[in-house]
Image (tube, grey):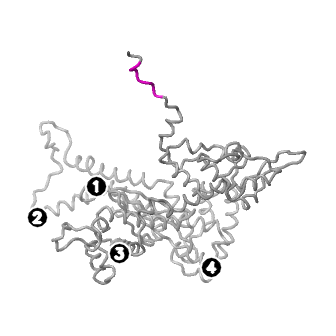
Amino acid sequence: MEKYLKRKASSSTGNNDASNNVIDVNDLPWDPSERTKIIIYNPNQRDEIRRQYLVRGPFQPRGHIFPTKVIGAKGRRFVVTWFDQFQWLEYSVKVDRAYCLPCYLFRDQGGNHGIEAFVAEGFNSWSKKDRLMHHEGEVNSFHHKALKKCEDLVNQNQSIVIALRKQTELMKTEYHMRLNAPVEVCRYLLENALRFRGNNESEKSMYKGLFLGTLKLIGRTNGETEKVILQNAPKNNQLTSPKIQKDLVTCFAEEVLKGVIGEIGDDVFALLVDESSDVSRKEQMAVVLRFVDKVGVVQERFVFKKDFSAFFMSWIHLLKDEDILEAIDLIGTTKGQLQMLRENGFDQVLEKCYSFCDKHKIVKLDMAEAYVNTKSSRKRMNINNQHYYNYDIFNTVLDMQIREFGDRFGEISSDLLQNMAALNPRNSFSQFNKSSLLKLSHMYPRDFEDKERIILEHELDIYYHSVYNDVRFANLNGIADLARLMVATRKHLSHPLVYRLLKLTLVFLLQLLLLKDAFRR
């Protein structure tokens, strides 16, 4: 009896298994010869796949060099103008054959006799153009039916799902007004760096935060808007929840970032990334972009991200380009002062400490006495207080400062700043040094090719005489003014390599920030 009760084994095939898989429609192959039959895909995803192919359009590599094949003792090949005459036509670079996109998308829905040449096998009889028109056929041909199905699929208003959800024009207008109000509130709060939420946003609360408060103010000033927002809106479509607010802020962040990226384009820029924690101990990330815009003005964009939301601010030229010149002098001077302080500064510091003790009647420590370690008083160190505080404390701290300063501003950094100073236009370009600028170009090996440096050497001579004898360049205060004026006078087109060097100098933000921070501390 067991053989009659035994269950039959599953007869599923590999194709059935594959049809249950959900794929990423962005990974669909472009070349027609590499495509899988639509019926192989998951039934719930087939329309989505068809729609993705229709959005892409037929694969038409118009810039491709089509190979020639001998047909009837003559060389024949695919003609690119066929793409204009037969808009459904697509071409496989891989196998040198033509295909029909609509017929491929709906080949498995019956009545597909005679289309295999344009779907599975591919068409390559280049001497028989009439076969293309024959494939289209009459009005009731499979090809025209497939075209109509493509139109219906793209036109979402034709689908049953959309028809059931179709809204009236009044409902669409009300929704647009309801959405526009929170968008404007977000714009205002972000531009002024104001907080959104309140501590208590319940109905009985007197202060519900700036977002809801400003939205209510917009309603009071516009009667039409007031009818469709807050309590007058559907409970499940008020567009005021914290999640909606975060989504709106994210949209603003993406648009601003897209604008910044478009403003930079393919030009050079400096990037500084830092992270810190706020008062609630949540980590934040700050990104600063510094670049030169199309009119030669230094721009800086600050991107501030916190807990997966984003807030954007911008400012223009916070750092003065004179910092480069001041930095060159300060580096050498500071290194010398630190060394002098290490060698001769302890007595001065000790004298000030004694003066403070006398003023406030504090018992002074005798430097000649033996030093006693308060943590281990029994262990004698055989040194006096003078030796401990002078060499073990004072000199050790200064050695750390000198080492950090040397690591941060080594020979390469100093040379870089020194070479940058040669671009300074003040005092009628008195700092101009051709040799320094050529060295500066070598510090940017990826921005200047060897042949460009040869051209730069000659261009620098012409540039110097051009700006030196031009009265418009006589009273410039820094390299930022120089960049703006070069664009205004179109000299950035006459001296493109010099202007490129100038932009690289202007966007060199990171070193300046470190330098400025080091001197401030």
Q: The residue under label 4 is which amino acid type? A: Thr
Q: Secondary structure at mark 2?
A: loop
Q: Which range of residues does the magenta coloring cover?
A: 4-10
The answer to whether 391 appears left or right of 453 in the picture is left
Mark 4 lies on residue: 489
Residue lying at 82% horizontally and 48% vertically, measured from the top left = 68
Q: Secondary structure at mark 4?
A: loop
Question: Height in image: 430 above or below 437?
Answer: below
The answer to whether 320 appears left or right of 136 in the picture is left
Marks 3 and 1, how far apart at CA:
31 Å
Mark 3 lies on residue: 181
Reading the chain from its start, which is encountered first: label 2 or label 4?
2
The answer to whether 181 appears left or right of 352 in the picture is right
Residue 164 placement (x, y as % from top left): 42, 62
10 Å crowding of disc 2: few (<14), some (14-19), many (20+): few
Q: The residue under label 1 is which amino acid type? A: Lys
Residue 342 placement (x, y as % from top left): 33, 54
